[in-house]
Image: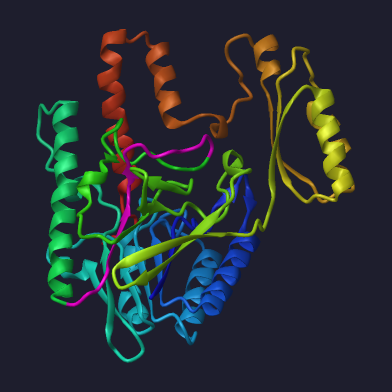
């Protein structure tokens, strides 16, 4: 049996105002061709299908067109989709019955009244079971932890950890029951931040919980899982140095922090219950390039890209000592007549020299909500001893807003 592990498509995501639908379409075409060429039996999408809870029409069209194409392929027997923290559970679940007819099983969020929905028995063309999938979606705080007044951060951390363990334990037990005495692999899924996981600056990975509450220990996942397909982190990586507990990462770079990263999908071939994992490189459909340095260095690298005929999107950061007020004019002149695009220019020297402490030209792209809150605490001269608790409370409010399902009724 062949399984393809993907995650974090983030359909609809833009990059500093630049729409990326051509990239997403190219990736989905490549993915469909790979599935057909390699005769993949089962496709896993481990959360964050869309970038927002209210994706635009073009993002939806790409998603549904791809699923229809896979449903009509002669190879792929099943697609399993779980919701991520960027997804709206009710939006993903709305076409659940229709997609089920196309052999696409969707679990947008856990349903305490219907936990068996997270168990998927995958079958071959003759209807013979081949694998059991534990389709566990992103577990929101309210799904697995009962908040109580007066809790300390340690109390919250312990409750959340036990909530993860308890839910995966229940689903793992159900999977073993579904397998029975048959020699079928059990494949777990999840969308979370595993302890020890790696992120990059500007990779679009949103914090799931306050502080380190969201870091799930590898021991929380049942030993019965023969392979664990995780989503959320955009860097391909192993969990606890295991070859069978894996993040495949995002298929295209979500920000300039991922510009040099080789993107992957993971192909898992089972012989009985023994998995062989192969890293499949994803082609680069739109190069990103970050250039930092003095003006001379920036212009020299732009000239080299021009000679190469590059069509990269650029982030440029000036880090020299001199005050350069016409940086944008210089770099735009350097790329005139090329396919290069400047998506962002950072000129911190202007703020340092002219505005001393505060850059009134700063935009929200340069700040995180927590940065703004920290500045408010500073501005209002809040005592340092009170700041950690206030910051934690603010982070919980942000989490509640992020997890709100705008499509729920």
- Residue 130, percent across and down? 29, 78
Is 389 located above or below residue 47 in the figure?
A: above
Is 268 located above or below residue 195 in the figure?
A: below
Residue 288 falls in which quadrant of the image?
top right
Q: Quadrant of the C terminus?
A: bottom left
Residue 46 falls in which quadrant of the image?
bottom left
Specify whether 340 is left or right of 231: right
* Residue 251 visible to an observer of this rendering: yes
Foreground: 369 or 191? 191
Residue 90 falls in which quadrant of the image?
bottom left
- Residue 61, percent across and down? 52, 71
* Residue 329 visible to an observer of this rendering: no
Say whether residue 152 is magenta.
no
Specify whether 253 is left or right of 353: left
How many discs mark residues in the rendered view? 0
Residue shown at 38%/76% (left/top)?
1
Say whether residue 184 is magenta.
yes
Is 252 located above or below residue 376 in the figure?
A: below
Give the prevailing secondary structure in the magenta stretch: loop
Q: How is the image coloured?
A: rainbow
Magenta-tinted stretch: 182-202
- Residue 86, percent across and down? 40, 52
Residue shown at 51%/80% (left/top)?
69
Instruction: Give the residue at the far bottom of this rendering.
Output: 126
- Residue 227, percent across and down? 32, 60
Residue shown at 32%/69% (left/top)?
106
């Amino acid at each position: 049996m062949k399984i393809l592990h993907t995650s974090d498509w983030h359909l609809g995501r833009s990059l500093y105002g630049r729409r990326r639908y051509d990239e997403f379409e190219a990736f989905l075409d490549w993915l469909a061709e790979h599935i057909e060429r390699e005769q993949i039996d089962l496709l896993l999408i481990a959360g964050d299908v869309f970038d927002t809870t209210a994706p635009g029409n073009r993002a939806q069209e790409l998603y549904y067109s791809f699923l229809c194409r896979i449903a009509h392929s002669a190879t792929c027997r099943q697609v399993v989709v779980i919701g991520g923290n960027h997804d709206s559970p009710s939006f993903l679940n709305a076409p659940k019955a229709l997609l089920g007819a196309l052999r696409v099983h969707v679990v947008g969020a856990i349903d305490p009244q219907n936990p068996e929905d997270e168990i998927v028995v995958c079958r071959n063309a003759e209807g013979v079971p081949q694998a059991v999938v534990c389709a566990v979606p992103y577990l929101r705080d309210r799904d697995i932890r009962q908040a109580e007044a007066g809790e300390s951060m340690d109390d919250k951390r312990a409750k959340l950890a036990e909530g993860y363990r308890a839910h995966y334990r229940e689903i793992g037990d159900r999977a073993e029951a579904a397998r029975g005495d048959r020699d079928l692999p059990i494949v777990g899924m999840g969308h979370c931040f595993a302890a020890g996981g790696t992120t990059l600056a500007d990779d679009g990975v949103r914090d799931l919980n306050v502080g380190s509450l969201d870091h799930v220990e590898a021991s929380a996942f049942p030993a019965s899982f023969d392979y664990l397909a995780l989503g959320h982190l955009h860097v391909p990586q192993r969990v606890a140095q295991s070859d069978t507990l894996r993040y495949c990462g995002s298929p295209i770079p979500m920000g300039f922090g991922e510009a040099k990263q080789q993107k992957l999908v993971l192909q898992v071939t089972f012989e009985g219950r023994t998995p062989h994992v192969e890293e499949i490189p994803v082609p680069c459909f739109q190069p990103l390039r970050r250039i930092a340095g003095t003006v001379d260095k920036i212009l020299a690298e732009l000239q080299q890209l021009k000679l190469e005929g590059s069509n990269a999107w650029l982030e440029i950061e000036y880090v020299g000592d001199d005050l350069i007020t016409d940086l944008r004019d210089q770099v735009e002149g350097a790329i005139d007549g090329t396919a290069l695009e400047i998506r962002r220019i950072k000129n911190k020297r202007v703020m340092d020299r002219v505005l001393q402490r505060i850059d009134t030209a700063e935009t929200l792209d340069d700040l995180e909500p927590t940065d703004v809150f920290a500045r408010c605490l500073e501005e209002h001269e809040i005592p340092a001893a009170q700041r950690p608790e206030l910051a934690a409370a603010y982070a919980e409010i942000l989490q509640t807003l992020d997890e709100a399902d705008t499509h729920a009724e």
